[in-house]
Image (spheres, rainbow, N blue to C red):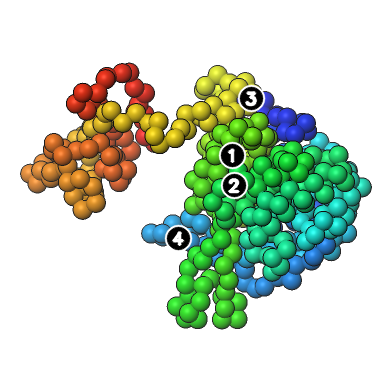
Amino acid sequence: MGIKKDLSIDYLGVKCENPFFLSSSPVGSNYEMVAKAFETGWGGVFYKTIGIFVADECSPRFDHVKKEGMPWLGFKNMEQISDKPTEVNFENMYKLKKAYPEKIMVASIMGSNEDEWRKLAKMCDEVGVDLIEGNFSCPQMTSHAMGSDVGSNPDLVRAYSKAVAETTKIPFIAKMTPNITDMTIPAIAAMEGGAKGISAINTIKSITNIDLDNMTGMPVVNGKSSISGYSGAAVKPVALRFIAQMLQHEKLKNVPMSGIGGIETWRDCLEFLLLGCRNLQVTTSVMQYGYRVVEDMSNGLMHWMDERGYDKLDDFIGMALGNVIPAEDLNRDFKILPDFNDKKCVGCGRCYISCYDAGHQAIDWNTEKRRPELNDKCVGCHLCLNVCPVANCITPGEVKWKDGRQEVEIAMKKDYE
């Protein structure tokens, strides 16, 4: 029998069977798709953004970034909000909630003025969705009155959040744009306007590739292209950074956070949870592998919980947040020299080349043994460890304290996967 753990969680007062939700996007844009996702194991859906405005899409609209034959390192999406009639989308959400009452339906909405936000919120109320997300973050809208241009304007974020909060009692979540320096500013404005939670991040404005035939970006639409949203594995570090900064802010530290950005595996899910997220949204990996990625997320997370002795998500949510500290507070009194395992070393010389050309020239190459040898120039940067193609061949070794510094017990990472 497989390992079973309780993955249920309270999110904004709503009981969720697990934290895994489809994010507002093409992967959850009609009845059939969402129904299949629910039956595969997703706890809920942020249904593709609905507006009074109905999108008129271009073709093609997707592109991806690859390196050394590895595709989908990053993904570009030029699609806007739903291209289906507003009433049809609300009807789909109503039918889905009736057919799957235990699943959580989140309506993602976007207006272009306060009246539209109020109208959409009222329609959400009539349909009976569990939660509402305000899309202040889509980077490819054709109107500056919608999307990320609104999300970078705290006054508009506050006003539109207030318009929704005054119209309905359904908890309102504000979805943030990463196309801004400090996300805490619009996030605080949203909470001041009446939002109850924050989602982060939406996609990052990008040009993924230049097409050499048409001399424009990708994808090529009649010989032209445009700047639009970047997602996938490449954006996870940016998402984790914004989420940590918001949850460490005095005014946002207790805000229920929904994490988005490059979530592909159970390990990605765990990282967002450890920073403090109570809900997880996924799109790009579903576009690659289908709805069944949720099976790895559930199973992998339960196995990790079993190994660590955790019974529920609340046992470890946010455990990593306090260990992300300002750079000026890091202990800089020591350096950790790398330790080379000659038996695991394959003699490729990547550590030597990288250190000589781009590091501190702290590795000599023993041509007779075809093995690296550390010299006294090492500063403990661990570039060698990061470029080594063999797992745990180069590991953290001796700790050397700088002259005059007080030695204390330090925590080290020993095992590199």
For the residue marked with disc 3, what is the amino acid?
A: Asp
Under circle 3, the secondary element is: helix
Q: Are marks 2 and 1 in contact (CB under 8 Å)?
A: yes
For the residue marked with disc 2, what is the amino acid?
A: Met
Query: Residue 108: image x %, image y %?
Result: 76, 51
Q: Can you tell which mark lies on residue 246?
A: 1
Reply above or below: 384 against 273: below
Q: CA distance from mark 2 to mark 1?
A: 7 Å
Q: Residue furthest front?
A: 155
Q: Residue furthest left?
A: 368
Q: CA distance from mark 4 to mark 3?
A: 37 Å
Q: Taking the image as drawn, is residue 304 in sight?
A: no
Upstream in sequence: badge 4 or badge 1: 4
**Within 10 Å of the Cα at label 1, are there few (<14), some (14-19), or many (20+) other Cα atoms?**
many
Q: Nearer the viewer, residue 76 or 343?
A: 76
Q: Are marks 2 and 3 in contact (CB under 8 Å)?
A: no
Q: CA distance from mark 4 to mark 2?
A: 29 Å
Upstream in sequence: badge 2 or badge 1: 2
Q: Nearer the viewer, residue 172 or 25?
A: 172
Give the residue drawn at x 57%, y 53%: 180
For the residue marked with disc 4, what is the amino acid?
A: Lys
Reply above or below: 7 against 123: above
Would you name the residue on which mark 3 appears? 314
Under circle 2, the secondary element is: loop
Upstream in sequence: badge 1 or badge 3: 1
Q: CA distance from mark 2 to mark 3?
A: 25 Å
Would you name the residue on which mark 4 appears? 66
Please state, as top left, top right, bottom left or bottom right, where the N terminus lies in the image. Answer: top right
